[in-house]
Every structure is written in structure tokens, then in C-alpha cells.
Amino acid sequence: MGSFDYDLVVIGGGSGGVRAARFSAAAGARVAIVEERDWGGTCVNVGCIPKKLFGYAAHYSEEFRDARRFGWSSMEPRFDWPTLRDNKTAEITRLNGIYVNMLKDAGCSVLEGRARLAGPHEVDINGQRFRTANILVATGGWPYVPDIPGRDHAITSNECFFLDELPRSIVIVGGGYIAAEFAGIFHGLGVEVTQLYRGELFLRGFDDDIRRHLAGEMRTKGIDLRFSSDVAAITRTNGGFSVSLTDGVSLDTGLVMYATGRRPLTSGLGLEEAGVAVNNNGTIPVDDHFRTNVPSVFAIGDVLGRLELTPVATTEGMAVAATLFGDGPKSVDYTNIPSAVFSQPELATVGLTESEARRQYADGVDIYMARFRPLRHTISLNEEKTLMKLVVASATDRVVGVHMVGEDAAEILQGLAVALKAGATKADFDATVGIHPTSAEEFVTMRQKAA
Ligand code: NDP
């Protein structure tokens, strides 16, 4: 290793890259990490963290209303967007600093600028060449907007965190995580929201009952959720934008946001020149240990096009650190990875959907379901309903899927993900004593099969 400046150069200071750099340095490696934008990547700057903060803000509008029947009265609440936006930005700036300090404390060289592979063991950073034993590509992704007339009028999740002012209305295009989350956020902040999805039911890949239930809840709250609806063109008008749909309908709106997926940020990195294979869609193929076809170059996170989730990227980052500088090759188990859509109400899930389980288990599956009004809303009279669902493999009694729409769904499902990972059976769920009164206790008191 003597002729190398570093044992590892990490390109990309997002969740995955930072974790890999810190764990590699902690194992004694000489590590440099380079970032061209903001430390912490998508999650910290234009993703999970600011989105969750905005979600809290959006929730207050309902909570002020719910509080009245609990005896609280106050002046009519008024929302000030710049206060939220700027407090959020201050918190993110604080986190950016924490990331840099964590890296420096771990002993990493922290570099800012544009990096480019100049060979299997060489990285060019701001025109300076470094020789390194290994390179890790963790450059993440970028919002994708389809090529429709007027696409430049649309914002994406990158811009919505920094708007000068809130629009009176917004059209959100897409039916995935980001579209569902921002429909709830903007609606809660008082914006009139229309969400358009091209297919018959949004959140493709999630359990059908859960998708239908969330759609109903979002509509009850007042979101104009339209399926089988696609955009033909966007034009600017006096007061905002006109969105023409392929079925001839036209919508006037203050803002258009596209949330139609993300693409890996892998072009212009010198990958091809260094001999690293790249798929047609820009993702990087790797083996079980995140090694590309070039043995000294590794890749993790959103550039793989697998599960675009922060905890997945950090797990992959730790696997690379262990493989290179720990006690041998490590891979990642992608089964039973829980995830949540921070819609309003929240959706969370782990394991198989009912239809996946029916395909996978020839001996059949048992379904348990509970749909109820949470205790809090018996007084608030908020119409929000919770749905919980268990999918059980009949032959083994193993719980193979847990799904929920409702308050604190993500917090509840994190614990149940441990149960699934540990192979819990329905009998184990039944033998667990509930915590009363909670919504979560429903998961251990479902006795009646729904199917
Ligand atoms: P998703 O992949 O979740 O959803 C993309 C949506 O856009 C789908 O509904 C898709 O439809 C639709 N779409 C794709 N192309 C077009 C098109 N040309 N015209 C119209 N609609 C289109 O992507 P997001 O952008 O919402 O989020 C990106 C990723 O980030 C997520 O997949 C997730 O992994 C991650 N994320 C995770 C969060 C969390 O953990 N809470 C929060 C936010 C993001 P169809 O289904 O028909 O293909």
C-alpha cells in the first residue's frame, strides 16, 4: 500500500459514503472522502430529515382542530412559511457541520469539490491526482422528470424545501413515496393539493389493502387524488401554470411538482474511462460485496438502483468497510427490510404483501386485519381510520408480512420488523401481551381471520 496516498477514497458524502468512510477509518484505514455539494447528501439536505420536519409542521393544522373537542381553544392558528423553511435550513446547516466533524474525528481527510476516476487506483479531485488502493462510488441519485413539453416549469423535491413562498395550490405528479409524502405536507400547510398518478392505484409494490386505505384517507382529508391521470404538457399562465392532462382536462395551479422517481448520478465520473461497467439506466452492477467489475472500485447506495433507502445505504457502507478493512467479505441481507411512507396518515410495512405471499406460499396464507378509529379520535371526531394487516404463511404459521396505515405506523413497525427478522409465528404474536391502550396492541390481539 506504500505507493498509495490513501487506502480508500470515497466519492460522495451522503449517508452511505460517510458511514463507509467512518467505519473504514475506525478500522485503521487511511481514508479520504469528497463531496461536491452538501455534506449528508440527499437524506440530510433534500430528503428524509427536512421532509420529516415539514411533516411535523403539516400535522399541527389537524392537531389544532382536534384539540378543540378536548377543551382547548385559542386564536385561529396562522402559518408562516418562512419561519418553518428557515428554521429547517438552520437545523440542516447544523447537521452538515456535525457530519464534517464526525468524519474529521474519525481521522478521514475531508475534501470538497468534484471527483473523477482517472484509473482503477487514481482519483482526480479539483485537478489534483490522488493514488488510492480502493475507490468507493457513493454519489447517490437525482430527481427524474420525464420529457414532456413544459417540464422546465416543474419543480422537484430538490426545490420544494427552499420555496420563496407557498403556492395557493399545487399539482403533484407521481404515485410513489415522495409524491404521497408531499401531498400530505402541502395539504397540511394549507395548500390546495391535486396529486396525479398514471396507474390505477398509487404506491405500486405496497399491499393493495394498504394502498386503497391510504387513498381513501387522503381523499377524506381533502386531497384531490386522481388515478389513471397523466400530464401531456405544462404551460405558464398569468397567475401560475396550466397542466394539460392526456384525457383533455386542464388544471390551473400555482405550482407543479414532479416526483416521478430518481436516477443514479453516475455520468461524468470517469467510470467508463476507468473500465467500470455501467448499466444503460446509469446504475452500477456490483457483486455481493459491492465490488464492480474493476476489483479496486466499489459502489453502494442509490447508484445501485436497488432499495433507495438511507438505512440500506449505510448498511452497505458498513459492509464495504468490513470487507476491505475488517474481518472479511460481508454482504447485506435484503429480506424483510422495513420502510415507511410519511404520508398523512403514515404508512409502514415489512415483509411480503398479501399478493406476494400468495404467489410464494403454495400452501396458502392467512390474513388478519383490523380497521378502527383510534381512541384519540373518539373525542376529536377526526375521521381518520387506522388499518393494520398481518400476512401469515398457513403451513408454518410464520408471520411473513406486517402492514399499517395510521398514526405512528413507522415507530410501531420498526419493532415488528425485529419480530419478522427473528422468524416470529402468529402464535408468538398471540402469546405477546399488549400494551393497553395503544393502537399497536391490535397487532397482538387479531384472532379472526379476514381471509
Ligand atoms: P418512486 O419510485 O417511489 O415513485 C415514482 C412514481 O413516479 C411512481 O408512482 C411511478 O409510477 C411514477 N412515474 C415514473 N415515471 C413516470 C412518468 N414518466 N410519468 C408519470 N409517472 C411516472 O420515486 P420517488 O420519486 O417518489 O422517490 C424516489 C425513491 O426515494 C423512492 O423509491 C424511495 O426508495 C426513496 N424515498 C424513500 C422515502 C422513505 O423512506 N420514506 C421517502 C422518499 C423517497 P409507476 O408506479 O407506474 O411506475
Image: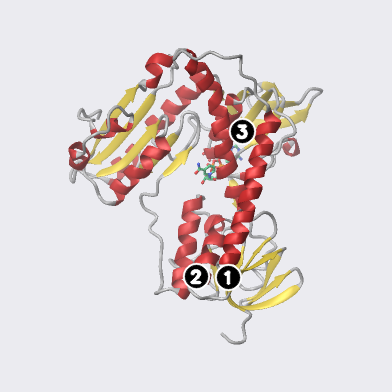
Q: Give the alpha-carbon distance from disc 1 to disc 3, as whole Å.
A: 44 Å
Residue 173 tag number: 3
Q: Tags 1 and 3 in contact by the CB under 8 Å rule?
A: no
Amino acid identity at mark 2 = Ala
* Spot occupied by residue 234 in the image (x, y as percentages of width and height): 73, 31
Which one is earlier in the sequence, the residue at label 2 or at label 3? 2
Q: Secondary structure at mark 1?
A: loop
Which sits in the foreground, 152 or 381?
A: 381
Which residue bears the numbered disc 1? Answer: 107
Which one is earlier in the sequence, the residue at label 1 or at label 3? 1
Position of the C terminus, as image quadrant, is: top left
5 shown above or below 190: below
Q: Residue at x 45, y 12 (%)?
A: 69
Q: Tags 2 and 1 in contact by the CB under 8 Å rule?
A: yes
Kindly indicate the quadrant of the structure image that contains residue 281: bottom right
Q: Give the alpha-carbon distance from disc 2 to disc 1, as whole Å.
A: 8 Å
* Spot occupied by residue 126 in the image (x, y as percentages of width and height): 75, 68
Q: Residue at x 46, y 12 (%)?
A: 71
Position of the N terminus, as image quadrant, is: bottom right
Tag nearer the camera, 1 or 3: 1
Amino acid identity at mark 3 = Val
